[in-house]
Amino acid sequence: MEEDDVTIREQNFHSQVREYIVCFLLFAVLYIVSYCVITRYKRKSDDQEDEDAIVNRISMYLCTFTLAVSGGAVLLLPFSIISNEILLSLPKNYYIQWLNGSLIHGLWNLVSLFSNLCLFVLMPFAYFFLESEGFAGSKKGIRARILETFVMLFLLGLLILGIVWVASALIDNDAASMESLYDLWEFYLPYLYSCISLMGGLLLLMCTPVGLSRMFTVMGQLLVKPTILEDLDEQIYCIQLQEEALERRLNGTTSNCYFHGNSQHLYKDLDSIRNQRYKLERRKKASAWEKNLLYPIVMLILLAGTTISVLLVALNIVYLLVDETALPKGSKERDIGNASTFGVAQAVIEIILMFYLMVSSVVGFYSLWIFQELTPRKDDTTMTTIIGCCVSILVLSSALPVMSRTLGITRFDLLGDFGRFNWLGNFYIVVSYNLLFAVVTTWCLVRKFTSAVREELLKALGLDKLNLSNSTTDAESGKHAANGHQKTL
């Protein structure tokens, strides 16, 4: 009997060690990828090893950790769905015994823990540490900056604690709920993270429909559009003439200091014309299949992905109205989940849609005028902007599993602390969320694809000067094409 107990303890020990090794390897890969991404956009500084350089390096490591956690949050549902399908297809395979329910639950708990740590500790520390200079009258240095940072974190913690207490008193004025806030680890942090998750879900609701319509424009800029009734050689020749004319004007203004102020505007025009020439030359060098086949296929894929997402949301609304048990809920069992209705094909479609929604939400986030200042630029992004980007992506990625389950993109139950959010069991919140997503996404797509028709109707009615159409479309339609003529329908 003692030998059996020892054997069971050894098996549990080896299982725990194996899970720790797998989690460490996955996080190491995410950390390396995140570090490469941040160094690509981070502003290049001098090699001088001073105090600010050390502070920037520490902040960059914290941002890298946060971005790695964001990547883990994005991969939670896809990894769990793939693992579930593999275990159900090959239940007794020796080589996949390491892929068990304990590992999946551990990954969900770790991502939830690290998300709280990054959102409430590491990112505020990185920002305050970057902006700190030490208290007045104290000796300058790293220690003084660390002391000021911890004082600011303490004050921020008190502020957040007060806000949560006031919110709890306004929403649920109950003595039991107020006393439960004293339990910092079991109630207060999950409650606070539930509020942050709800804010992240609302942010996704605002960004994803905009990103779904914006994806067509982004892919149109990256790919080569088909050449229909266009003479690219003539357009390149006209662009070259304009470029030569601007170069001659610049040569004349550089010799005359009176026109020096106008030269900056000419340089901007010259850069714009050169960019147009590069794009036309790229279109000319592109192969026939890239121009005539790749672009329509990508546009059809984007349209199909958006249509399927809206249909799944509409179907989920019907499920919610018919059966209230369709509300998203957390799984407390050690098993991962049930098999998909249509097997591996459904799992693959769900994973593709989740990645598509995440990319669309990021594109929509940076497309909104409120967050356009956070758009990273290659080799020219400050650490403050990188911190803002990492916090935003962490909020979006942490809310992605909850949004995917709330919208019915997947039927996979939420694991760990992700299934403990209070608002997931509110029928009216979930149904309203689904309705808003379906309506706003459909409205953005209709507005996107009918913009050219609306512009022509306004021109025909003589109302084009009233700026009744959207500003983005007007700005794009006001630009001149490469041949010097204005774009028309």
Image (cartoon, rainbow, N blue to C red):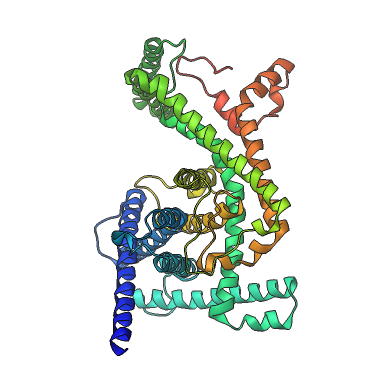
Residue 302, visible in the rendered structure: yes
From the viewer's perspective, is 446 left or right of 186?
A: right
Residue 124: x and y in percent read 48, 68
Name the residue: 72% across, 75% down.
Answer: 169
Q: Quadrant of residue 137?
A: bottom left
Residue 478: x and y in percent read 57, 24
In this rendering, the answer to whether 56 lies above or below 462 is below
User: Image quadrant for the N terminus?
Assistant: bottom left
Of 164 and 433, the residue lying toward us: 433
Q: How many marks?
A: 0
Of 483 and 339, the residue lying toward us: 339
The residue positioned farthest toward the bottom in the image shown: 2
Name the residue: 40% across, 56% down.
Answer: 83
Of 259 and 62, the residue lying toward us: 62
Of 152 and 168, the residue lying toward us: 168
Name the residue: 57% across, 29% down.
Answer: 475
In this rendering, the answer to whether 391 lies above or below 229 is below
User: Image quadrant for the C terminus?
Assistant: top right
Residue 464: x and y in percent read 69, 22
From the viewer's perspective, is 172 left or right of 209?
A: right
Residue 127, visible in the rendered structure: no
Residue 20: x and y in percent read 33, 70
